[in-house]
Each structure stands twice: as structure tokens, then as C-alpha cells.
Image (cartoon, rainbow, N blue to C red):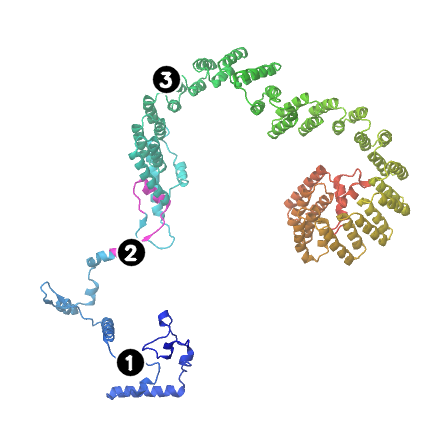
Amino acid sequence: MSNKLAFLNQEAPANYVAGLGRGATGFTTRSDIGPAAEGPDEETLQAAIAAQAAARENAETGGDQDVDGQFQDPENETGLFANAPYDREDEEADRTYDLIEDTMMTRRNKRARAEDGDEEEEVRRDKNGTVLPPIRSQFTELKRGLATVTDDEWANLPEVGDLTRKHKRQKQQQKEQRYYAVPDSVIAGAQDSTQYETSIEASGVETGTTTDFVEMGQARDKILGIKLDQASLKAGASSSIDPKGYLTGLESQVVQSSAEIGDVKKARLLLQSVTQTNPKHAPGWIAAARLEEVAGKQVQARQLAAKGCEHCPLNEDIWLESARLNGTDNAKRILAQAVTHLPESVKIWIQAMRLETENVNQRRVMRKALEIIPQSVRLWKEAVNLEEDPKDAKLLLARATELIPLSIELWLALARLETYDNARKVLNKARASIRTSYEIWIAAARLEEQQGNGERVPVVIKRAITELTRYGGMLSREQWLLEAEKNEEDGGILTAQAIVAAVLDMGLDEEDKKDTWMDDAAGAIERSHVETARAIFAFALRVLPTKKSIWRKAAEFEKSLENRANLFEVLDKGVSACPHSEILWLMYAKEKWLSGDLVAARDILASSFEHNPNSEDIWLAAVKLETENGELDNARQYLARARREAGTERIFIRSAVFERQAGRLQEALVLVNEGLAEFSKSEKLWLIKGQLYELLSNTNLGREAYSAAVKLCKTSVPIWVAAARLEEQDDKVIRARALLDRARLANKSNETLWYHSIQLELRTSHVAQAKNLISKALQECPKSGLLWSEQIFQEPKNARIPRATDALHKCETDPHLVSAIGRIFWDQRKYEKAGNWMGKAIKGDIDNGDSWGWYYKFLVETTPLLATDKEKEDRARKIEETLLEAEKADPKHGLLWPAINKADKNIKAPLQARLEQFAGSVKVLGSIA
């Protein structure tokens, strides 16, 4: 059986389109129609021109047209569907096209006749349909008569108003009407006169930015008149106006813009609705009155306030607002009416008193008010302030305290006016009336302090604590300390000290007392309450006399105040309470020495030896004291005694350095050997021994000393570096390189050893080897700013900044890297950036002497490059500030700084001289000059 469908062998029905049922439609491609027609050639064009000429001749002669060739041109559509059937749709389409063609033809004919001037007038008919003659025929005879008018008669004809086009002209002017930004003065004048117009007629106005000064002057005159009228309505004797000052004030007057005027209108409508819907709402009347006041309409504002008083007679705010808006006389009447409705309103009585200008009248008003409101503390205070005689004031206060016995303010005011004995009585009565008032107790303590009874102040405060605790008026510990600070501000030092002594340990556990008290003292110091802080330290030292840290902080506190008397008192008590505190003895001796009392300093150190015989700090302080004052023999004796009694490594080191600085190298060498016998692994003693042999020019013994040292102190980087430097100075670079290699093996990831290895290659002109070492060093120490600095300096000049950017991602805050970036900017003459970066390096590590040296070198060497004298003066001040900051920081570390700072020749050299020496030994883009 065949699977082929039967209909596939049948013919398709008529008008069948494949795929039409599923929405597919056919389309024509270029391959279906062939290539596009080409343009005509020269012969074809000539033939077409000849055919057109023949057609015109045939049309003129009326001959038949040859239509055989019209179908030859594919672009010509004439007669294209002549043989197609003509149905109803074609007929309707032809009618539509004919109608359109007739309409367009009529329009073209009218336009042509209008252009030719022969347009025919429309036919006019009357109500009955009778055709009327054309209008122009009615004036035919008149126009013939115009032929006799001469030129002079035509010229002398009068102008006649064009009444027929009046409305048309007005509409045209409205279309052409223009709007301009009106000056603020005109708006203000129109606003005050309740009429304003913001449009200007187009006639007579020039376009552009021309200002009409006449109109501005008229607006100013109108404002002046309004202000003068307002001033005349104000009560009082000051009705005269200074013309010059007033006109000057008008210039600075703030005039509302059109937008603000619109806002005022909206607000006025809103508030009008509020007052109408709820007339008993006083804030609505107040807001409406203030709106009119802001709008400059004082009369309307007063009227609204008066209406508010009528509708809300029991609201004191509306009465006060009405009085404020009126003059003095009217305000008095208004407030007099107000007290009839609100006789117990304190605000109204006080405002009525303030409206009076004479003291007698003011007191009279207050007396009336007190008769009605005798329980008002505020009224009594105002009445007392009005009294000129203290006796009358005391009488008033006495009466006030009888009527209001619970008012602390009145009791204290009465006590201040009384004598000492009477004040005590008053305060006793006050305490009996108000058992929970701490203010009365503090006032009693202040009274005793002012009277000179300082011993009674602590007694009063202790009684206050007891009584307040009993009756529930006790303050917290923090609140009492704040009261102590307030009394210090008012001059009550003894009262503040008594408060601190009474409450400082209140509610504290034993283990928390020290830390809490130190925090209290720090807070008082921060708030600049010195006496309160001193009282806290004094109390803490009485309770915890053996705490060395408290004595030290108290001494530092007195030192910060530069009060030597208190400082010496604290230190003297401190060494007595803590005789084994080395730091207190040293501070005491140093402060005495700095004050110029050398004898007292020696006595203090001598006393400290008795309590601390084995203290190396005290022994070395005594040596330094004698050395600074040139007493070398005394210093040597102290060192010998210290070696016998203490015998520490540090004392042996100081002894050897002392002899070396004195130029006694052999004696120093003996002391070093004695020290090494006791402390064989002392890094500094081995270094001093090697340096002594170098000073004695004995390289072999120095080499032996360093060789023994590196065996005993394998992790000591300074010994390895010193040994390599000795070999380099002896022209044995290979040995120096080998020593540094051994050192790096013994001390992994040590940036200092890598740095000195790189510097060795650079000093011996092995640049390629140095770069190779830098790469290895950064692999082992990727976050070393020191090594990144060397990498940057070895780059070409244009590649240093990009390399520095990479380095900052690895070690952003390293002072070596930050200082190196500053030197790069210095080399590129970007001095502002250079200074900023070097300053950042100092802030990153103030103990790094290299950063201080580079910054000082930059400031000094770039000073001559400044343009103006003012810049040079500022730079000089900057250098002085930098030196002061460096002395305060006292840097000790760095790569190059220690060698300069600890050199024997620089022992007594000032810091500036050492910084200058550093600046002379380095160059901008290198380590050693």
C-alpha cells in the first residue's frame, strides 16, 4: 500500500495560494524581475525629444496622436489598465478624484483672480432673496467726482478715526502685549496701596534692558509716604524721622518678590478659613496677625489681634500679641483689659510692668500683681529687682519666704542680702523648710568660706551628706563632682575640695577606686577645672599613699601647670611615701637640676642611694648629672661605685662609653673586657670593643673581636654590619660580602641586612649585582619600605612614580618609603608635595631620626627658592617649629641617625647641629653623600 496522499496528484483549485491559510504570503525577489532598467543613452534621449516635438505639433494641428509608443516606457502608466473591467469601486474612486480636482481647481482660480485684481464680488441678497447690486456700484458716481480733486486738496484732508477696526486693533494689541520683570520697589508700593499691576503696555516701551528710572522714583516716593503714615500712627514721643537716615534705611529694605506676595495671599486665605471655622482657636488669630505684620499691614494685624481678644478672652498669648502690635499707650489699655479676664496671668502682669517707664509705676504694678498672685516666685523676684533700697528688698524677700517657704531661690536671695549671722539663721530656716535641698547646704558652706572659716566648710558638707541621705535628697557621685566644678568656677575652692573629699569614694569597690579616681581627675583636667583635679589627686594619695603611679601622675599634672612649688611638694611627699620608687627620685632630682639647684639635686640622689643601692637608673642619673656639669672625676667615682654595688651590664657599657668619650681608649678597653667577663653575650660590649680597636687602628684585633662576637651573638644585626664595614674599610670587599651573606642566612627576612648588602654593591659600583639583590630582597621581604625605596631609586626617572605607587600598595605607612617618595618629588621640583610627604613620614614614626633629618634638609635647602620675603619668613618659622618638635620627640633610631646622634664629638652638640650634620652627609636620591 502506497503512503502517498491522493490529493498530491490532483490539480490545485482556482485562485489557490500555497500557505495562505497559515498566514504565509509570497514575496518577489530581484531574481524574479531581473536586473533594474538602465538609464537611457544619448540616442534614446534624442529620439524621445523628437517624439515630444512631434506630439506637440500634432496637438496644435488637431491630428491624431500616436499612442503606439506610450506603452514602450515602463515608467509611463498612462492607459495601463485600459483593458481592465470597470466596476462600482472604480466609479466611486473616479468621482472622489474628480471632486478633489474640482475643489483644487476652484481654489487655484480664486488665487489667480486675486493676484490679477479681478476677483469678483460675492452675490449679495436681502432677506427676501432679492439680488442686491454690488457695493462698488453704489460709489461709482462719487469716485468719478474724485477725479477733480487736486493734489493739495488730497494732502489737506483731515485724519479720520478708524472706528470700523477698533475691536480688531485692540485684539491685536492684546496679542502683542509683553510682560517684563517689574522692580521690587514698584511691587512693594502697589502692595501697600492694595493695588498692583505687573503688566506694562507695549506702546511706548522699548525692548531690551532699559530701566524706567521715573517709575522707580515714583515707587520709592510711594513707599516713603506709606512708611511715614505708619510712623505717625505709632504712639510715643519719638515721632520725628531723620530724613537722611530714613532714606538710607529704605535702600536696605527687603522687598517681597511676586512669589512671596502670592504665598502671603495663600496663607491669608488659609488663616482666614481657620479663624472663621474655629474662632475660639487663639493660635489661628495670632498667626493671622503676624502674617499681616510680615506683609507690612500693621492696621490689619492689630484688627485681627483685637478680634482674637474678643473671641478668646481667656488666652494670655493673644492679649500679649495684641499689646505687642500696638503702641505703648494702647498696649497699656489692652493689658489693663486683659487682667480683668486673666487676673492670675503672670506673663500679662510682667509685660504690663515693662511697659511702664518709671520705677514707681513699675513697683505699683508689681504690688498689685502680688496682691492677686502671692504664690508666684517670678513676680516676687521681679519685685525685688525693682527695689533700689536693700532694706526694702530684704523686707520683700522675708515676706516672700513666708508665703512661699518651698522656694529655694527666694531663701538663697534673702541669705545673700543678710549679714553673716542673719544669713546663717535664714539658711537654717531654709533647711528646716526644705529638707531635700542640696543648694542650701552648699550655700551654707560657701558662707563659711567667704567668712574665712575654712575649717568649718568640710563639717558643713559632711552634715549635708548625712541629712540629704536621711531625707532622700542625696545626689549621685557624678552630680556632686559637677557641683564641685561649679563651685570652683564661682571661686569656692574650699567648698569644691570639701565636696570632693566627701563623695569621691562613695559607692566604689576597693579594686575600682584607683582607676575611677584617675578617670575623674583626667576629666576635670580636660574641662580645665584645675582645683577639682588637684583635690582628686590629694584625696587619692591620702587613701592610697603607696601607689607610685598616682604620685607620678600628680607630679606630671603639677609640671604641666608649671607650678614648681606644688611640683616639689608633691615629689617630696612622693619619695617619702614611696622611697623605693626610682622614677620619683629621678624626677625630683631632674626638676631640681632644671631649676638650677645643683646642690639639692645631688642631695636627692644621695638620699636615693640609701633606699636604692642597686638601682642602675639612679647611679647613671648621678653620672649624667656630674657629666653635664663638667665634674668628670665625680662621675668616674660614681661609675666605679656603681660597678661594685650594682655591677649590671648597662653600668659596664656606660663606664666604657664614658672613658671612650673622655679619650681614654685603653681604660675603656679594660672596662669592656671586664664587662665581657661577666656578660659574654652582651651585644653592645662587643660592638664597643670592636669600635675601640678601630679607633686604635688595630684592624686585626678588631676583626678578631667581631669574629668572636658573631659566634656568640649570631642574631645581632649591628655586629654583622660592623664586621662587614670593617672588612670593606680594609679593602676586603669579598670578605665583607661573605659576612653579609652569612648574616642573612642566620637572620632570615631581615631588611637591614639586605639593605647593607645592596649598599655594599652600590659603593663598589656593582649596580647589576645590586639590582639583583634588590629583586631577591623584595621576594623575601615584600612589605619592606626600606627595600622598596632602594628599588625606586634604581629605576629611571620617569618610572619612579609608578614604582612608588606599586610600593604604596604593599607598605603604605612605612616611614622609609614615605620619606623616599617625598625625596622623589623634591628631585622633580614639586616642593609642596615633597614637604607634605616628608611631614607624613615624621608623623608615621617620630622616633625615626632619618625622617627628621631629611625634612630639616628639605626645609633649609629649599628656602632660597622661595619667591617672596613673606614666604621666607614663614619658612623660617616653620624651621623653628620643626626643631622644637624634634627636641620634644628626641629621636633615637634610624639607619643613619644613630651614628651621628651617638658620636663622641656630638655628645654636647645641640639637636640643630646634629641635624645639620645629617643634612650634609646625605643627598636627595641616595643614602650616603
What residue sits right under mark 3 in the picture?
A: 372
Most foreground residue, 698 or 144: 698
> Residue pushed farthest front?
1
Q: Position of residue 533 (x, y in %)?
A: 63, 25
Q: Which of the 4 image quadrants contains residue 888?
A: top right
Contact, mark 2 vs mark 3 (Cβ under 8 Å)? no
Q: Amino acid at mark 1?
A: Phe
Relative to 674, is 463 on the left or the right? Answer: left
Most foreground residue, 904 or 51: 51
Q: Sequence-wise, which precedes: disc 1 or disc 3? A: 1
- Residue 813 visible in the shown view: yes
Q: What segment is highlighted magenta in the picture?
A: 170-197
**Picture disc at residue 81:** 1
Q: Given this view, does label 1 or label 3 mark the residue nearer the observer?
A: 1
Q: Sequence-wise, which precedes: disc 2 or disc 3? A: 2
Work out how far the residue at label 2 is from the one at label 3, CA to CA, in angstroms: 72 Å
**Is residue 783 shown above or below 675?**
below
Q: Sequence-wise, which precedes: disc 1 or disc 2? A: 1
Helix, strand or loop under label 2: helix
Helix, strand or loop under label 1: loop
